Amino acid sequence: MVSQQEIRLRDGRRVQAYDSGVTDGVDPFTVLWHHGSPQTGAPLEPLLTAARARGIRLLSYGRPSYGGSSPLAGRDVASAAADVAQIVDALGVDRFAVMGASGGGPHALACAALLPDRVTGVVCLAGLAPFTEAFDWYAGMVAPGGLRAAAAGRAARERHAATDEFDVNSFTSADWAALDGTWASLGADAQRAGGEGPDGLVADDLAFVAPWGFDVTRVGAPALFVQGGQDRVVPPSHADWLVDNCPASELWLRPRDGHVSVLDASAVAMDWLRATNTGP
């Protein structure tokens, strides 16, 4: 059974964390999941199922302003690493792997770069690359309005949030099928997160288009990038750039997948993390 725990951080903020627990008193391989934008941070059923089948302890948490976690003014992507270090300390975890999907990808990379003695490997599924002029960062995005507004500053992003509506063309037919089936829990959780207000998503977008606070070339742990070839939210060019700039990385391109259906690779990506684990 998944336990939910409110963790008090050193600066007084509260974070809602989730823990699938250990199995039969044995301390298993641990993976910390970084959720997409917007989501509450509660673990999704397909991830829990995959973790249980592999004897993996799955942790997750709500980033600031998501799922009851306190806001953090002006947060950058790097700030996730400091929060995660305190979360795993509170849960009695030393070394662990990280996974992140979509908006969770950059935050997973932050942990890998900034907690090198603790993170054994990282998987990013459909994750954004840092905001750069090295390639056309927006090209292939069906609805980049929120990110473009964020690049113009907080006021512009908040104005956009007041009228923003999801563009259904952002998802492929494979994505919609996934949301109607295996990943229905993702859609339900995203709706819950949206119902809490736009603050978490606004903060994420502002962080994505600002300096991240770390260099991805510092990611020394094995890194796997899983990318849908038909992704209309985070196009394949982002994964290509990340693979070119992260030293110990590889790319799994799934040509027929979009932004959601690519998550079907999560279970085998957990196998990859375990296989590359060099920790005790």
Image (tube, rainbow, N blue to C red):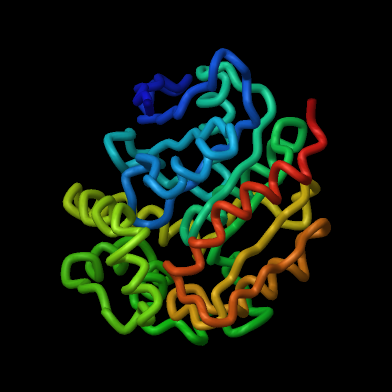
Q: Which is more toward the observer, 58 or 237?
A: 58
Q: How many marks?
A: 0
Which residue is depicted at the point 71% across and 41% down?
Answer: 274
x%, y% of residue 261?
Answer: 45, 69
Residue 183 sits in quarter: bottom left
Quadrant location of the C terminus in the rendered image: top right
Q: Which is more toward the observer, 195 or 72?
A: 195
Quadrant location of the N terminus in the rendered image: top left
Residue 152 sits in quarter: bottom left
x%, y% of residue 128?
Answer: 55, 66
In the rendered structure, the answer to whether residue 36 lies left or right of residue 240 reads left
x%, y% of residue 64?
Answer: 38, 40
Using the image, determine if residue 157 lies above or below residue 145. above
In the rendered structure, the answer to whether residue 55 lies left or right of residue 153 reads right
In this view, which residue lies farthest toward the top?
A: 25
Q: Which is more toward the observer, 38 or 65?
A: 38
x%, y% of residue 195?
Answer: 17, 52
Which residue is depicted at the point 30% across and 69% down?
Answer: 156
Using the image, determine if residue 258 lies above or below residue 182. below
